[in-house]
Amino acid sequence: MHPLCDTATPHPAGYRDVEVGQLAACLPAELTLVDVREAAELDGILGHVAGIRHVPLATVPDVVDAWPRDTDVVLICRSGARSAKAASSLVTLGFTRVMNLRGGMLAWNTARLPVVRPVPHALPTLGTVRDGLLDGLHRAVAPPPHE
């Protein structure tokens, strides 16, 4: 049992809300970090917390079925909404030590906490974006070719 669950803020739905600073102070720890976002989001601009288990929201009930009900679980998503749904679901399934990362990865990034991201790609220049948009616009309004 990790003390984070005992110090987190109780939520009426039966889970506890954890602030990003609280979680960051505990890592690495014996906590099960579950990111419920879709796969593409994990490597997106917000990245993900190191050591997470990826369990998309729709698959949570099936994946956690075999887990001990007293597992210390911290659920993570983009803003805290999807992870709150997952947290409520786990409480309904009988889990007793469920936590939701309040504010999700948006709050984590705002606090400038470490994240895992893919190697960044160079951003396109304004000129490249403008030229691509103009080219697409010209193709969209150009008359079809005559054969």
Image (cartoon, helix red, strand yellow):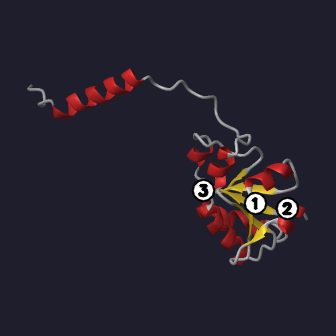
* Figure quadrant of the N terminus: bottom right
Question: The disc labelled 2 sits on which kind of residue?
Answer: Leu
| Rendering coords of residue 28 (x, y %) | 86, 47
| Rendering coords of residue 15 (x, y %) | 74, 72
Question: The disc labelled 3 sits on which kind of residue?
Answer: Ser
Nearer-N-terminus badge (1/3):
1
Question: Is there CB contact under 8 Å for labels 2 and 1?
Answer: yes
| Rendering coords of residue 42 (x, y %) | 62, 45
Residue 23's label in the rendered image is: none
Above or below for 122 versus 107? above
Question: The disc labelled 1 sits on which kind of residue?
Answer: Val
Q: Mark 3 = which residue?
A: 79
| Rendering coords of residue 114 (x, y %) | 74, 40
Above or below for 91 versus 1? below
Alpha-carbon distance for marks 2 and 3? 20 Å
Nearer-N-terminus badge (2/3):
2
Local crowd at mark 3 within 10 Å, few (<14), some, or many (≥20)? some
Element type where label 2 sits in the image: helix
Would residue 4 be seen by someone viewing this image from the given angle? yes
Above or below for 84 versus 48? below
Residue 74's label in the rendered image is: 1
Above or below for 121 versus 12? above
Where residue 145 sits, quadrant-wise, is top left
Would residue 71 be seen by someone viewing this image from the given angle? no
Alpha-carbon distance for marks 2 and 1? 10 Å
* Figure quadrant of the C terminus: top left
Q: Mark 2 = which residue?
A: 4
Where residue 102 sits, quadrant-wise, is bottom right
